[in-house]
């Protein structure tokens, strides 16, 4: 009788920890973590460099590109494309779109596809922004955390 009660208490505690983690993590970092997990499982032999979040990545993306800015995630993959990923939210696109545009512009690098990852509810806003921004070319993709591998 005690064992089921302990199991139930453990499940509630685990759910509580997950709820606290969700409430104390920014929308940006949740989207970045989901993006990382998706790429890690989709392209297991790739090298992943991640900023901002604590995951078991291959390192931080600082210095990987010849840029004074640091992308949220870089994927090196010998089987398909290399990606440089910038994660934004709907709010950041609405309130600091010029900064997002400048970052994507700075991340233009030979051998990389740029990907703007946004939560699903910001997809149309991101597509409009990419269309309206003068980013020099058509090599910037818009994806959600669970569709970012489509850019490969």
Image (tube, rainbow, N blue to C red):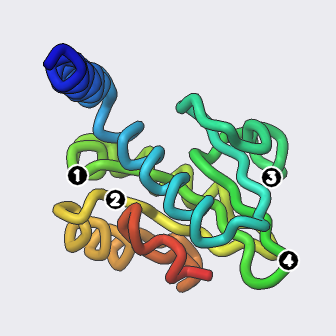
Tell me: residue 27, above or below residue 8. Answer: below
Sequence order check, earlier mark of 1 and 4 = 4
Sequence order check, earlier mark of 2 and 3 = 3
* Percent x, y of residue 6: 22, 17
Q: CA distance from mark 1 to mark 4?
A: 32 Å
Q: Secondary structure at mark 3?
A: loop
The answer to whether one can see residue 121 in this image is: yes
Along the line of sight, which residue is nearer the eye, 112 or 96?
112
- At 31% from the left and 24% from the top, the residue drawn is 21
Bin the neighbour count of mark 4 within 10 Å (Cα to Cα): few under 14, some 14-19, many 20 and up.
Answer: few
Numbered tag placed on residue 65 in the rendering: 3
Along the line of sight, which residue is nearer the eye, 56 or 117?
56
- At 79% from the left and 71% from the top, the residue drawn is 77
Tell me: residue 3, above or below residue 44. Answer: above
Taking 60 as reference, is 141 left or right? left
Residue designated by label 1: 90
Sequence order check, earlier mark of 4 and 2 = 4
**Which of the two discs, 2 and 1, sits closer to the camera?**
2
């Amino acid at each position: 009788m005690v064992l089921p009660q302990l199991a139930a208490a453990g499940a509630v505690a685990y759910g509580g920890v997950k709820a606290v983690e969700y409430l104390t993590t920014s929308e940006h970092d949740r989207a970045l973590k989901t993006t990382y997990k998706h790429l890690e499982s989709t392209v297991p032999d790739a090298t992943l460099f991640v900023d901002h979040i604590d995951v078991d990545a291959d390192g931080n993306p600082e210095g990987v590109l010849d840029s004074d800015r640091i992308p949220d995630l870089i994927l090196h993959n010998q089987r398909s494309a290399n990606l440089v990923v910038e994660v934004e939210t709907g709010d950041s696109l609405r309130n600091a779109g010029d900064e997002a545009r400048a970052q994507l512009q700075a991340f233009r690098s030979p051998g990389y596809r740029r990907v703007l990852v946004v939560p699903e509810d910001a997809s149309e806003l991101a597509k409009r922004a990419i269309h309206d921004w003068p980013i020099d070319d058509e090599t910037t993709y818009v994806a959600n955390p669970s569709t970012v591998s489509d850019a490969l």
